[in-house]
Image: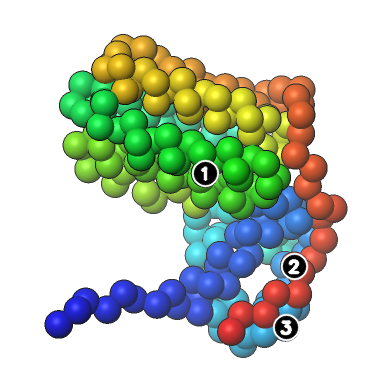
Amino acid sequence: MKTLEPQPTLVKLVYEAILAEIMQGRLGPEAPLVQGDIAKSLGVSRQPVQQALLLLRSQGILCNERGRLAVAPLDGERVRNLYEVRAMLDGLACARVAERCGASAREEGLALIARGREAAASHSIAQLVAADMDFHFFLYRLSGNPMIAETCAPHWNYLRCVMSAVLLKGETAERIWDEHEQILAAVVEGDAPRAEQLARDHIAQATEVVTTGAPPRTALVSEKVSPIRQRRIA
C-alpha cells in the first residue's frame, strides 16, 4: 500500500503566510499583529492564527511589545551566535562532501544554482530564501553526517528571517549565488580545505551585513511595511 503524504495543517499554512509577509519586509515591528484582522485576511478562524502566532513567538520571530504582539527586531547577538555555529557546520559539510563524493555533486549542484539564479532574476525574497536553503541542505545531505541538518533544523525558520534581512539590507542575490558556485566548484574538485573556507567566508559575510548594517550594494526593494495582505487560504 502506498504511503500517504501528510497534508500541511491549517496552522502550518497560516504560519507560512505570516512568515512570508515578515520575510518580504511587509510586516515589521511597527505593524500591529491583530488576530482578528489576520484571520479575516486569510479567510480562516482565529484559532489557527492564534496557534501560528504563538509558534512564531516561541521561535523568537515575534515578541510582546507594549502589550501587543509584534515582529521582533533581529537580535544581533543571537544572529552572531547562530551564524558562528552555522559557519562551522557549513564548513564541515562542504569539506565532507569534497572528501566523499565531490564529483558526483556537480550535476545536482549546478541545477540548484541555476534555480537560485532564476530566483535572483525574479527579485522574490521568498524564492531566493527557498533556493538558498535547498542548496545548503543539499550539501548537508551529501556530507554523510545527518547531525548537521538535525542541528540546524530547529533554527531554520529564524534563519529564514535572517536570510531575508540580508537581502533587504542590500546584499545582492547575484553575489550570493556567485559564492555558492565557487563553493560547489571547490567541492567538485575535491578541495576540502578550500570548500570549507569558502563556506565559512560566505556565512561570515552574511553575519556582517545583518549585525553591522553594512552599506547596501544593489538592494532588493521591499514593499512598504503594512498590515498583512488579503490572502485567503483554501
Instruction: Name the side, left or right, on which 73 lies relative to 12.
Output: right
Work out how far the residue at label 1 is from the one at label 2, CA to CA, in angstroms: 28 Å
| Vertical position of residue 173 compared to residue 153: above or below | above
Q: What element carries label 3?
A: helix
- Closer mark to the observer between disc 1 and disc 3: 1
Quadrant in which the N terminus appears: bottom left
Q: Is disc 3 surrounded by few (<14), some (14 to 19) or many (20+) residues within 10 Å?
A: some
Residue 40: mark in rendering:
3
Q: In this view, does 90 lie to the left or right of 97?
A: right
Outermost residue on the front side: it is 107
Amino acid type of the residue tagged 3 in the rendering: Lys
Q: Element under label 2?
A: loop
Disc 1 residue type (three-letter): Arg
Q: Are marks 2 and 3 in contact (CB under 8 Å)?
A: no
Q: Mark 1 points at which residue?
A: 115
Residue plotted at (20% across, 37% down): 145
Reading the image, the residue beneath label 2 is 228
The answer, for residue 181, to whether it is visible in the render is: yes
Quadrant assignment for the C terminus: bottom right
Pointer 2 local density, CA inside 10 Å: few below 14, some 14–19, many at least 20: many
Name which quarter of the figure residue 35 lies in: bottom right
Q: Who comes first in sequence, dot 2 or dot 3?
A: 3
Mark 2 is on which residue type? Ile
Seen from this angle, which residue lies furthest left? 1
Relative to 175, does residue 137 appear above or below in the rendering? below
Q: Residue at x 50, y 65 (%)?
A: 55
The residue located at (30%, 17%) in the rendering is 189
Along the line of sight, the residue nearer the viewer: 48 or 2: 2
